Amino acid sequence: MTGGSEITNLVINVSRSVVTGAPNQTVTLPNGTAVINQQFPNVREPSADDERDNALRVTTNDPITGAPVADVLLATIDAKFNVWAAGLRRPQHAGGG
């Protein structure tokens, strides 16, 4: 299964970020990271055909202690497919926020 998102004209901290469209493109921030088109498989069932995609995920840390301060997700979707008759795939569950 493949997924993806498209973001254009992204500006972070007054700096334009070139979005490549590649999965998991990471932009380093002074106190955290931004991950564009974040994609990762189900870790509970590695053989399952399901995936989570986040169009943009920004995490920040306290500059002194390094402790997490924020974890913001923009346009998240969970998709799961089950194999059924004749090996075709039918969506079982999809949710987003």
Image (spheres, rainbow, N blue to C red):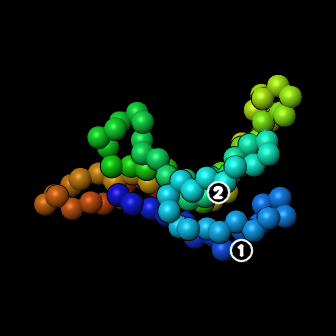
Report if residue 73 is visible in the image. Answer: no
Mark 2–mark 1 distance (CA, rounded to whole Å): 13 Å
**Residue beneath disc 2:** 56
User: Callout 2: few (<14), some (14-19), or many (20+) C-alpha neighbours within 10 Å?
Assistant: many
What's the amino acid at mark 2? Leu
Q: Dividing the picture into quarters, in which one does residue 15 lie? A: bottom right
Report if residue 25 is visible in the image. Answer: yes
Residue at the (34%, 54%) spot, across then down: 81
Give the image location of residue 6, x and y in percent: 57, 70
Give the image location of residue 70, x and y in percent: 77, 40
State the SS at label 1: loop
Position of the C terminus by quadrant: bottom right
**Residue beneath disc 1:** 9
Residue at the (39%, 60%) spot, across then down: 2
- Residue in front for this viewpoint, 76 or 85: 76
Give the image location of residue 69, x and y in percent: 80, 36
- Residue in front for this viewpoint, 97 or 23: 23
State the SS at label 2: strand
Position of the N terminus by quadrant: bottom left
Find out whether the residues at labels 2 and 1 contact each other: C-beta distance under 8 Å: no
Q: Dividing the picture into quarters, in which one does residue 54 lie? A: bottom right
User: Callout 1: few (<14), some (14-19), or many (20+) C-alpha neighbours within 10 Å?
Assistant: few
Residue at the extreme bottom of the image, as rendered: 9
What's the amino acid at mark 1? Asn
Question: In the shown orientation, is residue 45 left or right of residue 66?
Answer: left
- Residue in front for this viewpoint, 60 or 94: 60
In this rendering, the count of numbered labels is 2
Upstream in the sequence, badge 2 or badge 1?
1
